[in-house]
Amino acid sequence: MTDAAPPAYQGPQRVFSGMQPTNGLHLGNYLGALQKFVRLQDQYDCIYCIVDLHAITVGPDPKELTNRCREVAAAYIAAGVDPKKSIVFIQSAVREHTELTWVFNCVARMGWLERMTQFKDKAGKHAERSSVGLFDYPVLQAADILLYKATHVPVGEDQKQHLELSRDIAQKFNNDYGRADFFPLPEPLIQGPGARIMSLRDGSKKMSKSDPSDMTRINMTDDEATILSKIKKATTDPLPVPEAEEGLKGRAEVENLVGIFAAVTERSVADVLAEYGGKGFGVFKPALAEALAAKLSPIAGEMRRLTGDPGALDAILKDGAERARAIAGPIMAEVRDVVGFWRA
Ligand code: AQP
């Protein structure tokens, strides 16, 4: 007898993704994820979350948390997410996220979580002093996605391992409870320019909100002068810009800057090198700064306008939470039945 392949998931195709309201968003968040959020709206029903439950794993200031959530919502909308079409909401407003996390905590295995490199990076040498929440972060992330039975998840490359864990959890839940196609196995959408933007100071580290130095990143709200100053001070080497892609090998910082230029101007790397190959960074860097400012300044202006009216943003977030609950509630009720919880 041969094992039959499990039936393919038959439910609707749906996109889910989120960002943490920790520090302000940066160019890596924009190119790696947010730009994809905007494009996917034409193809799918999309749900975009502001993941405040994730943010408290590293303990941000409670006085700041709500405003930071509003800032992320403003960034989504200013970048082109349409809150009438897509659902934009704050994670903690939909309590089923935490309920499904508990169920998944009992599905996921310790060994799976112990392999997560992001926990090792974030906890550093002090893993035993990290919150349990930080360790459990990828299980909450799996619950975020699967609570909506999302089939596609736009993320940067750093999230690849977490997405694989979400698939493992979905698969094990389906197997354990004998419901072969209950949860879809969500597909990460990672490809594309900007999937991995590196620090401006160290080409071996990703650009990150939590890097202590602001000079390592371009924030979405940086003004033109700040962008120019950060790009001018970005690490390069004494050689000129190479003329072909092979010339980028072993020059991680240069490769990163050329990749950023290509991504923000929607050109290929080869095309950028054809224009700047052989020229010095004294020419390349101001051109890059100008391209960045042209891309980010209008978005930053719109973010300022949106955050200036918190009441209007809250109305959008309230509507988003209601629409999210309308999807999450019935799916969580189904999970409760599958697991065998008492039904009142
Ligand atoms: N450097 C990056 N290049 C490409 N994509 C990136 N993303 C993050 N950094 C880069 C993508 O942005 C989305 C939101 O990320 P997050 O807010 O959930 O947190 P993160 O992945 O941990 O990103 P940060 O900015 O580095 O935050 P901290 O410093 O707080 O950890 C995700 O899709 C991520 O892939």
Image: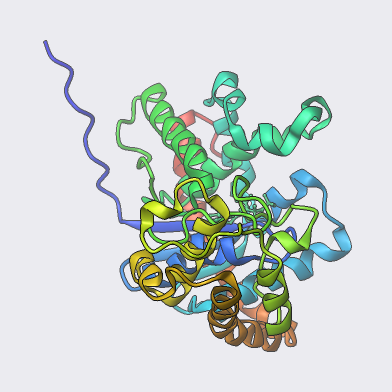
Q: Is residue 54 left or right of residue 145?
A: right
Q: Which image quadrant for residue 14?
A: bottom left
Establish if 299 lies above or below 138: below
Picture residue at 44% right of the left edge, 42% below the top:
334
Left or right of 101, for residue 149: left
Ligand 1's quadrant is bottom right
Q: Residue at x 67, y 31 (%)?
A: 120
Q: Quadrant of the C terminus?
A: top right
Q: Which quadrant of the figure contains the N terminus?
A: top left
99, above or below 37, in the image: above
Q: How many marks?
A: 0
Q: Residue furthest left?
A: 1
Q: Nearer the viewer, residue 322 or 237?
A: 237
Q: Position of residue 229 (x, y in %)?
A: 72, 75
Vertical side of 223 occupied by 261: above or below = above
**Residue at horizontal 46%, vertical 31%?**
169
- Residue 117 placement (x, y as % from top left): 60, 33
Tell me if residue 251 can be seen.
Answer: yes
**In the foreground, 289 or 37:** 289
Measuring from the top left, give residue 259's x and y in whole percent: 47, 62
Which residue is rendered at x = 42% and y = 26% of the image? Answer: 172
